[in-house]
Image: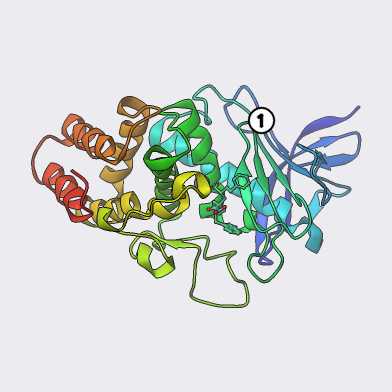
Amino acid sequence: ATDAATTGYGYGTKGDYKSLNTYAYNGTYYLYDTTKNMSGYIGTYTANYGNSLPGSWSVDSNNAFTSSSQGADVDAHAHAGIVYDYFLNTHNRNSYNGNGASIISTVHYGSNYNNAFWNGSQMVYGDGDGSLFSPLSGSLDVVAHELAHAVTEYTANLEYRNQSGALNESFSDVFGYFVEPNDWDLGEDVYTPGKAGDALRSLSNPERYGQPAHMDDFYYTSSDNGGVHTNSGIPNKAAYLTIQSIGKTKAEKIYYRALNTYLSKRSDFSDARAALLQSTADLYGTGSDYNAVKNAWDSVGVY
Ligand SMILES: O=C(O)[C@H](CCc1ccccc1)CC1(C(=O)N[C@@H](Cc2c[nH]c3ccccc23)C(=O)O)CCCC1
Ligand SMILES: [Zn+2]
């Protein structure tokens, strides 16, 4: 059988051309990327609008993933590679487990499914209903958000409820920014395709989309695991203020160090403040950067 790594191409859900790391096997081309220095691979599958995972390999007969139904596959595969490169190049972390674990994505999950998730083993993306969402793998910050959940699971493993869960959420939104720093929004590329200028969440103005930006407005609820997607607005605002003060290059190093070195399952917002301050001191001392982080958390009412 002739088999070898190949370079194909395709169009994302926005019609944008993308080069793809593919693999030829017996005359069929697979979204199977073996070009990274990982023990595993980056692979993209389709659930064919069903719910079984990972589904079947995303394949093409001539290495040109150009049909409209392949756009979500193209985006998931290309964006996964970008996020893999980010964690390796910026944080010297080889995949989510630090040891080259395979990064598996499945697209076309369910029917018009308006969400995406990391299920503990892989990333899964719905196509959206075309009104609330377009296919969710089309947003690089969403893909980074999901893969950051995997990184968190293998590092701090923040429990997904109440304050530790809101921190878990915030770290995923913040790494979504670090990977796609052209705006303070999350999910803007796939959220309400018929309406320009809005997003799922905003790091700079969490209140714009119904999230608190201060502890005084913490949302006590039993839904959504204690409001993890709502209360993340508070640490998200602190992250925005931190990045504005000390810059992305320093901020991403202190955020990664806090997650990887100081935070744990039951860490709360106050623990996050302490972990980020300690990480800042470790890396940059207790001068202006340290004071900026302190001021950011003071501003959101977390001590
Ligand atoms: O990774 C996450 O935190 C979210 C995972 C949601 C999920 C959890 C468990 C099983 C299924 C789905 C997915 C995303 C999220 O923030 N979802 C929110 C907002 C949301 C998306 N689609 C929705 C549809 C209805 C209501 C809320 C939503 C949520 O599930 O709350 C992250 C980036 C974009 C989608
Ligand atoms: Zn999340």
| Depicted 148 relative to depicted 138: above or below | above
- Which residue shows up at 41% across the image and 45% down it? 166
Looking at the image, which is closer to me, 251 or 89?
A: 251
Question: Is 13 displayed left or right of 244 in the figure?
Answer: right
Tell me residue 197's x, y (percent).
48, 75
* Quadrant holding the C terminus: top left
Mark 1, Cα crowd under 10 Å, few <14 / some 14-19 / many 20+, is some
Question: Is 131 displayed left or right of 251 in the figure?
Answer: right
Question: Is 9 displayed left or right of 156 in the figure?
Answer: right
Q: How is the image coloured?
A: rainbow
Question: Is 191 displayed left or right of 268 in the figure?
Answer: right
For mark 1, what is the residue? Answer: 41
Looking at the image, which is closer to me, 126 or 14?
A: 126
Specify the farthest residue to the left: 287
- Which residue shows up at 32% across the image and 39% down it? 255
Q: How many marks?
A: 1
Q: Which image quarter: residue 114?
A: bottom right
Q: Which image quarter: residue 112?
A: bottom right
Tell me residue 189's x, y (percent).
56, 65
Looking at the image, which is closer to me, 207 or 184?
A: 207
* Quadrant holding the N terminus: top right
Tell me residue 245's x, y (percent).
20, 54
Tell me residue 81's x, y (percent).
59, 42
| Depicted 101 relative to depicted 11: above or below | above
Which element is circle 1 on?
Answer: loop
Amino acid, disc 1: Tyr
